[in-house]
């Protein structure tokens, strides 16, 4: 029922790009550490960079567990599942890296995301994932659900922030600069947002 793929292309790429939500899973190396699972769903915030690399925009939130785990060990799994149409689940297991605002690669990567206004969501970093294992499974138990639209609440909340106020917001949060398990998270203060290329 499941199949392993060498690359992200063809119908697999089409399926991934058509989904309105995906999930990320990371964990620290410490066996007693906190496993993190996050939904991601702002339209236009995910791109396939090439046959083995994908990226998504890491927007403002009340913690930075994914960034912390990737900085420590790089392990990440992304998952998409079909809530409409033929059943399917796709997982990309790989190595992830948070590309932070002051990284020289940041502007060119940001330029790949042309379908979302990143200025409205408190963009912190761009997560780049290199696939090591790409698999699909049947998805027969995933329910049929319909997509109505993106929620506007995140953009409404963070569109009013500038670099300084966004950095101050993160500094007030207990688990942004440091993870739940005490790992280094998002480096603060937040560097200024460079223009996209």
Image: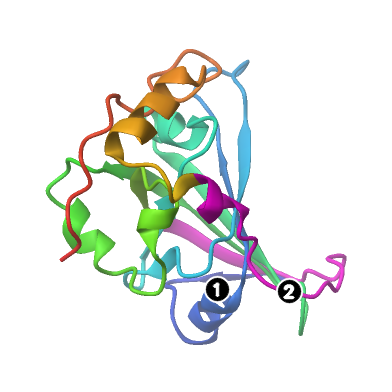
State the residue position of label 2: 147
State the residue position of label 1: 16
Q: What colouring method underlies this structural image?
A: rainbow
* Residue at 43%, 28% in the rendered image: 169
Q: Magenta segment, which residues?
A: 130-157
Report helix, strand or loop for mark 1.
Answer: helix
Instruction: State the separation of the CA atoms marked 2 and 1.
Output: 15 Å
Q: Is residue 63 left or right of residue 50?
A: right
Q: Quadrant of residue 45?
A: bottom left
> Where's residue 158, x and y in %?
47, 46
* Residue at 29%, 69% in the rendered image: 112
**Camera-side residue of 56 and 62:** 62
Q: Is residue 139 magenta?
A: yes
Classify the position of the N terminus by image quarter: bottom right
Point out the residue furthest to the left here.
Answer: 104
* Residue at 39%, 38% in the rendered image: 74
Residue 130 appearing in the image: no
> Where's residue 138, x and y in %?
76, 71
Task: Give whichever of discs 2 and 1 has the lower sequence position.
Answer: 1
Vertical position of residue 110 compared to residue 186: above or below: below
Q: Quadrant of residue 166?
A: top left
Vertical position of residue 151 compared to residue 12: above or below: above
> Where's residue 121, x and y in %?
45, 51
Q: Residues within 10 Å of mark 1 (few under 14, many from 20)?
A: many
**Camera-side residue of 144 and 170:** 170
> Where's residue 67, x and y in %?
42, 35
Report helix, strand or loop for mark 2.
Answer: loop
Q: Which dot, 2 or 1, sits closer to the camera?
A: 2
């Amino acid at each position: 029922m499941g199949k392993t793929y060498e690359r992200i292309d063809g119908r697999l790429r089409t399926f991934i790009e058509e989904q309105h939500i995906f999930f990320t899973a990371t964990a620290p190396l410490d066996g007693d550490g906190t496993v993190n699972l996050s939904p991601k769903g702002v339209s236009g915030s995910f791109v396939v960079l090439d046959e083995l690399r994908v990226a998504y925009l890491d927007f403002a939130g009340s913690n930075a567990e994914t960034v912390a785990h990737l900085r420590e060990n790089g392990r990440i799994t992304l998952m998409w599942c079909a809530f409409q149409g033929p059943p399917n689940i796709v997982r990309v297991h790989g190595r992830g890296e948070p590309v932070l605002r002051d990284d020289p690669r940041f502007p060119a990567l940001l330029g790949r995301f042309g379908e979302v206004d990143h200025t409205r969501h408190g963009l912190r970093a761009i997560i780049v994932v290199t696939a090591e294992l790409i698999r699909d499974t049947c998805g027969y138990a995933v329910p049929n659900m319909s997509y109505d639209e993106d929620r506007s609440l995140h953009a409404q909340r963070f569109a009013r922030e500038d670099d300084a106020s966004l950095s101050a917001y993160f500094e007030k949060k207990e688990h942004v600069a440091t993870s739940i398990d005490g790992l280094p998270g998002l480096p603060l203060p937040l560097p200024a947002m460079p223009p996209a290329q």
